[in-house]
């Protein structure tokens, strides 16, 4: 099976972005472009946790609802959530109402707040796990990596939850720590240019 599809402009793209109408814009403008904003990084880690056992489409179509419910993933605000906040979220039909996942986001917000006190930013910590591009597998042939295993393990040691290596690998793909667009994808070169000009946090 081909790893690409032809997009509306006649150019090749990663096959997965043709699976749902919401995917094309996400693929072309977000997926793989490097991110250093702490709230966006925390959002993606949280949403990947919510995706566990579900499809990314389910999460993507609800993303604005998640952002509203979790204050744009400002972890300093989420860290102050109490039981009434969790009860309110469990009644919110616009998000995934899974107690364990909601509680994990609140827990992880508290861990993120502490991590920032130590490291300066979540971005500085996360980007330490950027893989050496020379050692990467072919794009989209893996679901975990040495680096995603290491980041998952270290976050768990710090008390984070719903943060397994597959979740972390998907996060790394999306946030630009790796360029996993397939070789023939028209967006791959754009992501590569963005990565070359990107200033790594904490360096």
Image (tube, grey):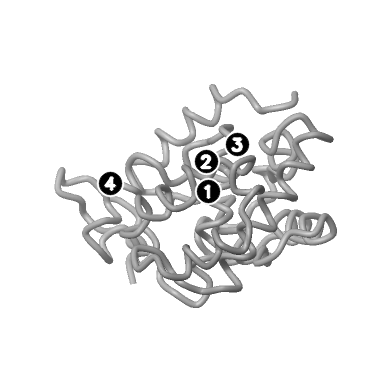
Q: What element does badge 2 sit on?
A: helix
Above or below, 95 against 38 in this view is below
Image position, residue 95 (x, y; %) = 40, 64
Camera-side residue of 51 and 111:
111
Classify mark 4: helix, strand or loop.
Answer: helix
Q: In this view, does 190 lie above or below 31?
A: above
In the picture shown, does residue 135 fall above or below 90? above
- CB atoms of marks 3 and 2 within 8 Å: yes
Of the pair 150 and 58, the residue shown nearer to us: 58
Give the residue pinned by disc 3. 38
- Residue 125's disc number: none
Q: Answer whether labels 1 and 3 touch (C-beta < 8 Å).
A: no
The residues tagged by marks 2 and 1 sit, at their Cα atoms, a distance apart of 5 Å
Q: What element carries label 3?
A: helix
Left or right: residue 75 versus residue 128 is left
Q: Residue at x 36, y 49 (%)?
A: 184
């Amino acid at each position: 099976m081909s790893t690409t599809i032809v997009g509306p402009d006649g150019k090749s793209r990663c096959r997965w972005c043709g699976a749902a109408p919401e995917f094309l814009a996400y693929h072309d403008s977000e997926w793989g472009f490097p991110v250093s904003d702490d709230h966006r990084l925390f959002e993606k880690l949280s949403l990947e946790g919510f995706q566990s056992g579900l499809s990314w489409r389910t999460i993507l179509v609800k993303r604005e609802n998640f952002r509203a419910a979790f204050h744009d993933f400002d972890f300093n605000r989420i860290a102050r959530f109490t039981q009434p906040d969790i009860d309110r979220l469990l009644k919110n039909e616009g998000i995934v109402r899974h107690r364990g996942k909601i509680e994990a986001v609140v827990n992880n917000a508290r861990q993120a707040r502490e991590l920032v006190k130590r490291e300066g930013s979540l971005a500085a910590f996360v980007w330490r796990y950027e893989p050496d591009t020379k050692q990467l597998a072919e794009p989209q042939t893996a679901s975990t990596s040495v680096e995603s295993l290491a980041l998952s393990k270290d976050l768990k040691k710090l008390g984070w939850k719903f943060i397994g290596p597959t979740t972390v690998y998907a996060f790394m793909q999306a946030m630009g720590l790796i360029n996993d667009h397939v070789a023939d994808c028209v967006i791959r070169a754009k992501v590569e240019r963005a990565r070359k000009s990107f200033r790594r946090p904490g360096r």
